[in-house]
Amino acid sequence: MKKILHPAENRGTANFGWLQANYSFSFANYFNPERIQFGKLRVLNDDQVDASMGFGKHPHKNMEIVTIPQSGALKHQDSMGNNGIIESGDIQVMSAGTGVEHSEVNASTTEPVTLFQIWIIPEKEDVSPRYDQKKIAPLLHDNSFSTIIKPKSEAQENELWIHQQAYFSIGKFSETTETNYSLHNKSHGVYVFVISGTILVDNETLSKRDAIGIWDTDTIAITAHKNSHVLLIEVPMN
């Protein structure tokens, strides 16, 4: 088993006034040659956006983009004709493919919105752009990890999927729980990101916004302490 620790306080940061950002990997003006990506996981940004502010219309191409609001709501518009609100408790998946323009703006005029934006490098380029959005809660099981995004080849009707052999799983633990996560492929790794609470992974204690990347293993043992909320992102390492 190989691992790399990413403590929360070691992330890149930026303050644009209207946007306070934390970067798990090199992004925008933050560059760290040792933190470019983890396998096919290229971006994990932890953002807070002021009321009525946001990301104006901008283009993307050949990237799988996942947005998970943590509090508040975002107003989404894109060049595919999608127009709506993404609230805390929702998850949005967008395949940029051949090219798409979109905007994400805080839907509130009084309160900030917090969100994770995650980019996965696709296994196939120049696909048709697409968009999907779902409520997370119905997809979860108590005190265990539930897979909420799968590769296109494995997804059933109405399941969220992306153009990569990647899996997103979320665990909400109301009680201290010992659990194992089994990787889908020996060439994959898992990026374990603590949204809140405290967990133990391979003798490493991780707290809010800490992360650990693990690979060269079949299974990962995780002890999630009471009231912990954890995101797992399994991706090909090559």
Image (cartoon, rainbow, N blue to C red):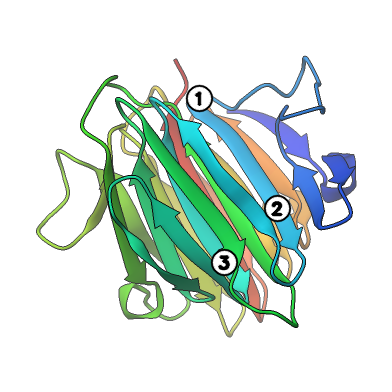
Left/right of residue 43 with respect to residue 30 in the rendered view: left
> At which x and y percent is residue 206?
76, 55
Quarter of the rendering occupied by the C terminus? top left
Outermost left residue: 157
Q: Residue at x 68, y 21 (%)?
A: 36
Q: Nearer the viewer, residue 49 or 224?
A: 49
Q: In the rendered image of this protein, does residue 233 appear above or below residue 177?
A: above
Residue 146 is at least partly visible in this image: yes
Instruction: Calculate the distance from the C-alpha at mark 2 to the C-alpha at mark 1.
Output: 27 Å
Circle 1 packing at 10 Å, graded few (<14), some (14-19), many (20+), is: some
> At which x and y percent is residue 108?
65, 79
Label 3 sits on what residue type? Pro
Residue designated by label 1: 216
Q: Quadrant of residue 163?
A: top left
Circle 3 packing at 10 Å, graded few (<14), some (14-19), many (20+), is: many
Left/right of residue 140 with respect to residue 209 in the rendered view: left
In front: label 2 or label 1: 2
Q: In the rendered image of this protein, does residue 93 appear above or below residue 174?
A: above
Label 1 sits on what residue type? Asp
Residue designated by label 2: 46
Circle 2 packing at 10 Å, graded few (<14), some (14-19), many (20+), is: many
Q: Nearer the viewer, residue 35 or 142?
A: 35
Label total for image = 3
Q: Which mark is residue 69?
A: 3
Disc with the residue nearer the chain's start (2 vs 1): 2
Secondary structure beneath label 2: strand
